Image (cartoon, rainbow, N blue to C red):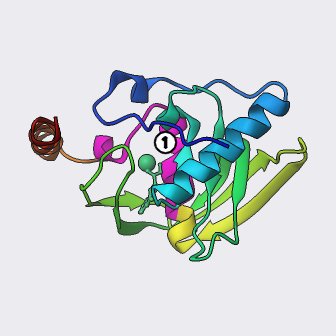
Amino acid sequence: MALLPILRYPDPRLKKVAQPVEKIDDTIRKLAADMAETMYEAPGIGLAATQVDVHLQLVVIDISEDKSDLRVLINPRIERLQGCHVGEEGCLSVPGIYEKVERAEQVTVHYQDLDGKNRSFTADGLLAVCVQHELDHLNGKVFVDHLSQLKQGRIKNKLAKQARVTA
Ligand code: GNR
Ligand code: NI
């Protein structure tokens, strides 16, 4: 297993749209394992392949406190959205920034698992937020893109300042 470097906003590679996974082979299984390790180490509750500069439709999610509920979603599609929920979000690609984002309250997601089996679940709460946040990444979107231009500008300035301090 290996830790993968995570792209930082506003890296233009975060805007790439992910392609479907055609064949679930050892390369995909290794990528999923490395992404899970990277997510746990960060630590985070989700990670999209886009964030590690792999532009395939694959995300890992685990919202448990004890790494006991790893979900690997291949070619995920949201089939049903219901309700509206505003919650604070953060992102491993936008470190130190937390802002409120409007999302659906409940989503049903269809996907393939690592055995290529078609699966689905319905989520609400933090899991629903995380699913929508990760699928945004696969479409080249970061949560910051949901905010006003003013807030986006402030966040870019803040991150640029942080980068200068840590350089
Ligand atoms: O670790 C994460 N926490 C989080 C908190 C609120 C809403 C969304 C998230 S996802 C984030 C990990 C990440 O950046 N995934 O893409
Ligand atoms: Ni994110």
Quadrant of the snapshot with the C terminus: top left
Quadrant of the snapshot with the N terminus: top right
Q: Which residues are magenta?
A: 129-146
The picture places residue 24, in percent across and down from the top left corner, at: 84, 32
The picture places residue 126, in percent across and down from the top left corner, at: 51, 70
* Residue at 41 percent of width and 23 percent of height: 13
Magenta span: helix, strand or loop, mainly?
helix
* Residue at 34 percent of width and 22 percent of height: 12
Query: Which residue bears the numbered disc 1?
Result: 136
Q: Report the image quarter containing ligand 1.
A: bottom left
* Residue at 64 percent of width and 23 percent of height: 19
- What kind of element bears circle 1? helix
Q: Does mark 1 have its CB less than 8 Å from ligand 2?
A: yes
Local crowd at mark 1 within 10 Å, few (<14), some, or many (≥20)? some
Q: In the figure, is residue 86 to the left or right of 123?
A: left
Determine if residue 76 is in view: no
Depicted 107 relative to depicted 25: above or below: below
